């Protein structure tokens, strides 16, 4: 069992930056597959970025070159650095985790057993 808590959301203007964090607790291991997802009003939740146990990262096409997912194993924190934000990035952002260190893969599909409650990101034009 792992508990995920997102933070860092807020309101920014288009072109601005924001850094989201996801604190993971309840697990002895700090390295496993994790991902960031988002859901805008009226839309389905979509994968944004993911990182596997070894640190390999993948991104949705819409955020490539703008977002960076990273993990700090020291404090069990997953981060999402978001640069050059645009209004289309407005959404509730969720972090997710899959604790199967040897079997999990970084994926943008909603196959993660554990999810946080989300943090709101609003980008104004």
Image (tube, grey):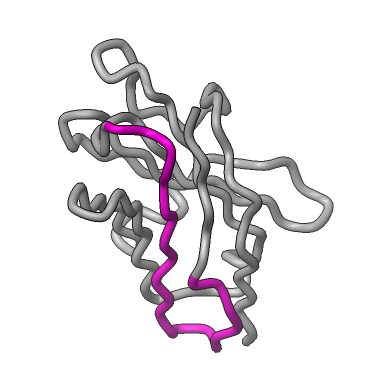
- Residue 119, picture quadrant: bottom right
Part of the protein shown in magenta: 8-28
**Image side of residue 110 versus residue 78, left or right:** right
Which sits in the foreground, 12 or 24? 24
Q: Quadrant of the C terminus?
A: bottom right
Give the x, y percent position of residue 96: 50, 38
Q: Quadrant of residue 81?
A: bottom left
Q: Nearer the viewer, residue 2 or 45?
A: 2
Residue 94 belongs to the span the image colors magenta = no
Position in image of residue 84 (x %, y %): 40, 76
Which residue is at a point 35% across and 58% down the rendered structure image?
79
* Residue farthest right in this picture: 42
Percent coordinates x, y for residue 112 in the rendering: 52, 26
Q: Residue at x 30, y 49 (%)?
A: 76
* x, y percent for residue 45: 67, 42
Q: Residue furthest top?
A: 103
């Amino acid at each position: 069992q792992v508990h995920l808590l997102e933070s860092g959301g807020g309101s920014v203007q288009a072109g601005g930056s924001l850094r989201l964090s996801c604190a993971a607790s309840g697990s002895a291991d700090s390295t496993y597959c994790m991902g960031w997802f988002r859901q805008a009003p009226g839309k389905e939740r979509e994968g944004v970025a993911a990182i596997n146990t070894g640190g390999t990262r993948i991104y949705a096409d819409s955020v490539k070159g703008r977002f960076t997912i990273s993990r700090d194993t020291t404090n069990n924190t997953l981060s999402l650095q978001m640069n050059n934000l645009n209004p289309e990035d407005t959404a509730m952002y969720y972090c997710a985790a899959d604790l199967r260190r040897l079997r999990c893969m970084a994926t943008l599909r909603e196959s993660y057993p554990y999810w946080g409650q989300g943090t709101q990101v609003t980008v104004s034009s």
